Amino acid sequence: MLIGIDVGGTYTDGVVFDRGEVIATTKVPTDDNDIKSTVLQVLDKLLLKQDKSDITRIVLSTTVVTNLLATGKGERTALLLIPGYGLPADAYDISDDTFFLKGGIDFRGRELDPLDEKELIQIGDNIVAAGIKRAAIISKFGNRNDNLEKQASHYMAQHYPQLSVTTGSQISGKLNFPRRATTAYYTAITSKEWNRFVDEIDQALTERGLDCEVHILKADGGTLALDVSRDMPCETVFSGPAASTMGAMALAGEGMNSVVLDIGGTTTDIALLIEGEPLYASKGASINQRYTHINAFAVRSIALGGDSCITVNAGQVEVQAYRRDVAACFGGSSATVTDAFNYKFNLNIGNPELSAAALEQIGGSAMSTEEVGAAVVAIVTNRLQDVITSMFKEWENEPAYKVWEVINKRKFTLEQITGIGAASRAIIPELADAMQVKHFIHQYADVANALGAAVARPTLAVNLHVDTQTKIYTLDPGGVRGTLENPHNFQLKDAREMARKHLEQVGKERGMASYTNESSFFMEEQFNMIGGWDQTGKLFDVGIQVTPGFIEEFKGVKI
């Protein structure tokens, strides 16, 4: 049996899935100040009639990292950059606490300039004097040679032991210095809080006597062993939207062109399925308008949900970007978006009379209940349509979107809106009618996020760079750097084999060995290096991955 738990901002959902059937579901309010207690409540309800020994795997999705970065509540962190030659210092607008170090590495991993110890002392003193306790150190082309990063990190550890340091080569082996710097910086910001979350989950599972495989859902819709995630918290950013996308895929079945809307209590997550497959963000996840090296779906979250508060000011209806309580029809204290749709379309959700009463109260003498309800419906549907239209402008620039149009020799056509989340039943039908497309809401749409997490399979990508002239190779993940034994005879087939072996090794370490035989190459490049009139060496870049999908035992959901 499998358990999926989605720790959302408003509710935490859980499912137990076994042999194609959802055999238990639950939904409890999320206590942001006590995640452990929330997860324990979910586990207790899910395991009420289940044998703990039958549980083989638990997967969680969570908004912990997303919320920490979105709200700016992360601890103050220093960013130490070793940019070498190229862009001026003011081109790197990532952190207010950015410090620049002398030193340089070229694109082939050769050290051009060393670090300046006096500069390290001055910067270290300034960081500590400012009360900063975390730092990220990133060197341009540090993915080709991380010696300068290691030297700076070692120096800081020796002289400033109170400073927790993250290096860029630990986090990403890809090119693009600003994105690698951003990814390492956000990792340093969130690492402590993420590890606290992992500790709470470990304690909750131990208290309930659960001894099984435990994973976390990543931004790309794949899973990662919970213990492994301690070193890479940013991989879990947008875990919630990834869960809703995987949930929609698991429930929809048919390979349709569909926009997925996960309408929760506070926010709505939006993603795109092209013939049933999710669209990826080719530039990586964008956090606070900055691109990162985190593989992710092309998603967006907006502050609009079923529990969004409704107000009337001077005869103007407004849908606020915050939540006060659950909908009035469920006993809440004020009118919400759900109440407006409940009243307007006679949906009979909860207690419809409470929805009408709440709308009447906020309308007062200025507006009738009918007018308030109609205004809210118009605001919500127009806002969602505008966001979807805006998203299509972004999606159209993604390679997979363009490839689909080239292959099919026609413009992409939206066929369906797939509704996920408790509030989708109220809002999606009207939105689909307004957009003149079909809609689909599965009977398990309310807990689709948890289901999507439960059945997602582990993912892993390996990148190899080889320079036969310098005899050096680098492998990511792991920041592995080594020397070729026989560089003169090294060919592309050897690069493929080296990348495949590293994938198998890392997969074994991460407990996903059974999935590495399903890998595929996504990049194979070879460049000849010329000196004078002769070939002096070759550069190889190879990428191999286990792509997102569902675990082998998942064949669909029985209705």
Image (cartoon, grey):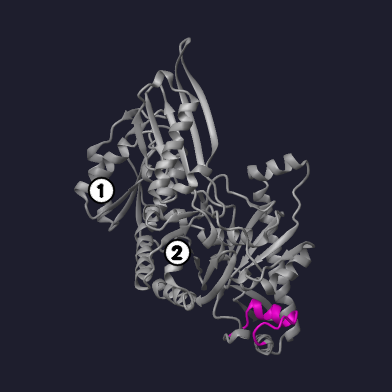
Q: Label 2, secondary structure: give it.
A: helix
Magenta residues (range): 334-351
Looking at the image, which residue sits at the far top?
A: 533
Q: Position of residue 442 (x, y in %)?
A: 67, 68
Residue plotted at (59% across, 76% down): 307
Q: Position of residue 40 (x, y in %)?
A: 42, 74
Q: Earlier in the sequence, mark 1 or mark 2?
A: 2
Residue plotted at (45% across, 59% down): 216
Which residue matches tag 1?
A: 124
Residue 535 visible in image? yes
Structural distance between the alpha carbons of marks 1 and 2: 30 Å
Q: Label 1, secondary structure: give it.
A: helix
Vertical position of residue 359 compared to residue 320: above or below: below
Q: Position of residue 150 (x, y in %)?
A: 29, 40
**Residue 296 versus residue 523: which sits nearer the camera?**
523
Tell me which corner region of the image, top left, top right, bottom left or bottom right, holds residue 381.
bottom right
Which residue matches tag 2?
A: 64
| Residue 461 in the figure: left or right of residue 369 | left
- Quadrant the C terminus occupies: bottom right
Q: Are marks 1 and 2 in contact (CB under 8 Å)?
A: no
Disc 2 residue type (three-letter): Val
